[in-house]
Amino acid sequence: MVKYKKTIRLKYGNTNCYLIQGRKKNILIDTDWAGLLPNFFRLLGEHKLKVQNIDYLFVTHYHPDHMGIAQNLIEYGVKLVVLDSQVNYIHQSDYIFKRQVNSKFKPIDDSQVLHLSITQSRKFLKDCGINGEILSTPGHTNCSISIVLDSGEAFVGDLYPYDQVSLYDNPILTESWKKLQEANVKIVHFAHYADERI
């Protein structure tokens, strides 16, 4: 039985972001580039939502098109949840934004981050009213994670699609997809590809 209200796809730039509305708390998966905060607010409004409706933010990996407005959202009260496999990577895109003229990027304030052990992810999501878990799924980056719901849906960020795995001949990527299959994933939501059924 599905233990969350619904999922809303939010695309206000080039990245598919997702809001999972739990029975108790709502989680946002990924953001887009720095400077797109007004676009994000506008899209929330179209869905009759506001930033105060978002409790937690998870970033599938710390590339600039997935974490660009993370600190902006923190300043509005959204808690950024960083998994133990991601701690050493949250500032890896800072230098990219520093090179941009007139960048609106704000680096993540480490003191405002909520750390979560991946082994505690099921309990954390359950407390939000969402049945699922978070898996470490490297292959695109070392810090990549996937949010996997017991309904069979997975939110994988930029993990390469299953039908492309053999092209990469990458045992790490193969292992990540094996984890997703073992978790009985049926529908995969990507950040830049169309949904895939496996």
Image (cartoon, grey):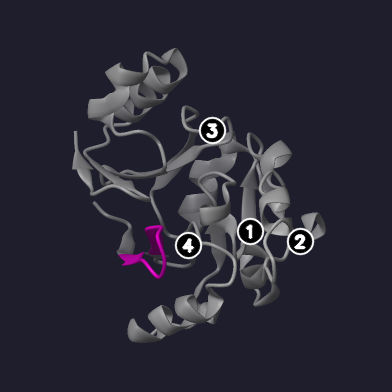
Determine the secondary structure under disc 2.
helix
Q: Give the side of residue 169 with respect to residue 38, left or right.
A: left
Estimate the spatial distance between the alpha carbons at disc 2 and disc 1, rounded to whole Å. 8 Å
* Residue designated by label 4: 28
Amino acid carrying mark 3 in the image: Thr
Q: Which mark is residue 80?
A: 1
* Residue designated by label 2: 112
N-term mark: 4 or 3: 4
Q: Give the side of residue 161 with respect to residue 102, left or right.
A: left
* Residue designated by label 3: 141
N-term mark: 2 or 1: 1
Q: Which residues are magenta?
A: 8-20
Estimate the spatial distance between the alpha carbons at disc 2 and disc 3, rounded to whole Å. 24 Å
Image mark count:
4
Q: Nearer the viewer, mark 2 or mark 3?
A: 3
Compared to 111, does 181 lie above or below?
A: above
Measuring from the top left, give residue 73's x and y in whole percent.
Answer: 62, 71
